[in-house]
Structures are given as C-alpha cells and as structure tokens.
Image (cartoon, rainbow, N blue to C red):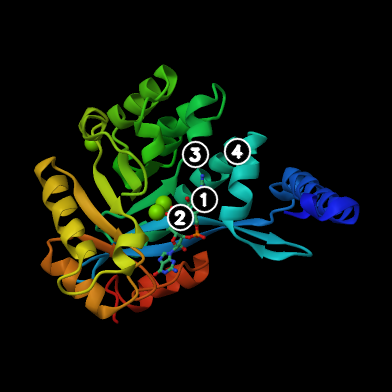
Amino acid sequence: KAKSNGRNGFEFFSADMREQAQARMQLLKDLRSAIELKQFELFYQPIVNLSDLHIHKAEGLIRWQHPEKGLISPIAFIPLAEETRQINALGQFVFGQALETLNDIKKLTSSEFQISVNVSPVQLSTLDSGIDDWPNMLKAAKLPASSIVAEITEGLMVNPEALTQTRLKTLVQSGMQLALDDFGTGYSSLAYLQEMDTDYLKIDKRFVDNITQGSQELALCEAIIVMAHQLGLKVIAEGIETELQMQLLLAAGCDYGQGYLFSKPLNKSRFMALLADKKMIISI
Ligand code: C2E
Ligand code: MG
Ligand code: MG
Ligand code: MG
C-alpha cells in the first residue's frame, strides 16, 4: 500500500519496517538474559471439575515481567523464544517451577493434583532440550509422573517427526499425561489422538465464546465431547467466562472447565492462597 504512494510513501514504509525490525532485535536481546535476571514467572490458572467445582488441576502459564515494557504476553515472546531455541531453557524453567508448586500443594491436600505445562514443538524436536530428563526430575522430586500433563497443539499431531513421536511416547510411557490444546483450531488426526494415548482434549476458547442455547458452537462442542469420550479422553473447555457457558457445557457432558468465570491465571502466592482459602473448591 505504502509502496504505491511513490517515493515518500516508500521511505515511510521502510522506516516503519526498520523500526519493527529493531524492536524485534531488542526483544530478542532482552530475552537472552531474562531467565538469569529472573524476569519470568509461572502463573497458575485453576481447572475445575464442572460437576462439583473442585480444583484438582491447574495450567501453568508463563509471564515475562520486562523492566521497561512491563508484562509481555507469551503470545508475543514464545515465537521469538522458539526461533532462538531459548524455549528449551524456558521450558525447563517452567517444568522446575511446576514441580516445586506440586510439592507445595502436597502440604495442603492429600488428593492428587495435576499441573499442565505447555510444551512447544521445538522442545520435542531439539535433541538436548532437556525434556528427556523430565521423568527423572519427577522421580527426584518424589512426585508421580501423572502429576504432570504436557499440553501440545494439534500441529504436532499432524505428521510429527520421528524424534518427536518417539519422545512423546517415552514421556507417556513414563506415566506423564497428554492434553491436546486448542482443539478445533487446526487439523487433528483422530488416529494420532489414540496412537499418542492422549488423556485430555481442550476445546478452544473460540467455540466456548459463542456457545448459546441451540447454537452451532454448542452442537459442535456436544459432538466433540461425545467423540472424545468414545476415545477415552476427558474434555476441558477453555475460556469459560459466563455461568451460561458453564451450564451448557456441563449439560453437554464436558468434564472440566477453565476460564475467568472461575479464576484468572494467578501468581504462585495468590494461587496457593486460593487453594488454601477455598479448600480446593471454587466459588462463583
Ligand atoms: P493456551 O495454552 O491455550 O492458554 C490459554 C490462554 O487463555 C491463556 O493465555 C489464558 O490466560 C487465557 N484464558 C484462560 N481463560 C480465559 C478466559 O476466560 N478469557 C480470556 N479472554 N482468556 C482466557 P496466556 O496466558 O496469554 O497464554 C497464551 C498462550 O501462550 C497459551 O495458550 C500457550 O499457547 C502459550 N504459553 C503460555 N505459557 C507457555 C509456556 O510456558 N510455554 C509455551 N511453550 N507456551 C506457553
Ligand atoms: Mg495450554
Ligand atoms: Mg496415558
Ligand atoms: Mg488453549
């Protein structure tokens, strides 16, 4: 568009592009030191059992507190971290934090708790990403392997590399569980859902957003839930914001829910306080 505006337009356009490229380079540079400078923090969003509102699970979500730019969304920096493979170190940080938190939760409750962590395809395709140590790290932390759920996206299910497939299988064989994140946004192979022994299917927020009585989205959710259950998977609905969405999903047979209706992602101390105060049951 700018190009067709002649000479000035073109210069304007390229200056803009240069600025963007510079901002990106700066962010890449800042990212490099962010782990050491302890600028990352793992937040936790409760996942509730829709039938009794018990909290037995949470998702770990990374946050970057940038000294000048403030809180930066993972949407903005995860792709950069993937490009530079720093996602591997970040992934190890996230996993370590999840283990610590699981051990702290053990002091609050005797029932089993699960924390899910988002796993980037890069972590699975990089040889020395550290992900192969996870079963040993779990043992060293004296935690059952099933206390961690690895969230992977549909992209990984379509034509995964041999290495990715073998590693996922090894992790699953060690007892770790698998969740398919953002279901419905890509192209999933049902065959892979079974082949990978997936435990959870997470219905993407975009479907939950538009759920009303008699809507297409509700029909779609109902179909997904029936299919998932038939394959032996539990279903988690993401992005539940209203009580109506919750009720319709519950009636559709959905097992778990996650969303602002129950709680936003919380930093560790607020999350621990929520678990302790509410005795592991959320009130809405
Ligand atoms: P995701 O794994 O699908 O996580 C769910 C996102 O939905 C989170 O955004 C969460 O805060 C948001 N969310 C949950 N409930 C609601 C709701 O009721 N309303 C609205 N509007 N949003 C809701 P967040 O934390 O910004 O994370 C975005 C994405 O970044 C995640 O999507 C995940 O793909 C990625 N991500 C986050 N942490 C990590 C990480 O540690 N490693 C990797 N590889 N990716 C991560
Ligand atoms: Mg996720
Ligand atoms: Mg399994
Ligand atoms: Mg998701």
Could you tell me which residue is drawn at 43 percent across and 47 percent down?
117
Q: What is the CA distance from the residue labelled 3 to the residue labelled 1?
A: 17 Å
Label annotation for residue 247: none
Q: Earlier in the sequence, mark 1 or mark 2?
A: 2
- Tell me the crowding category of disc 3: few under 14, some 14 to 19, or many 20 or more residues within 10 angstroms, Cα based: some
Q: Quadrant of residue 156?
A: top left
Dot 1 and dot 2 residues touching (CB under 8 Å): yes
Dot 4 and dot 1 residues touching (CB under 8 Å): no
Left or right of 226, for residue 172: right
Q: Residue furthest top?
A: 162
Q: What is the CA distance from the residue labelled 4 to the residue labelled 3?
A: 8 Å
Q: Earlier in the sequence, mark 4 or mark 3?
A: 4
Mark 3 residue's CB less than 8 Å from ligand 1: yes
Residue type at mark 1 is Gln
Nearest the viewer among 78 and 133 is 78
Q: What is the CA distance from the residue labelled 2 to the residue labelled 3?
A: 13 Å
Q: What residue is shown with label 1?
A: 97
Residue type at mark 2 is Gly
Residue 170 in the image: state x and y as whole percent: 34, 24
Q: Is residue 278 above or below residue 199?
A: below
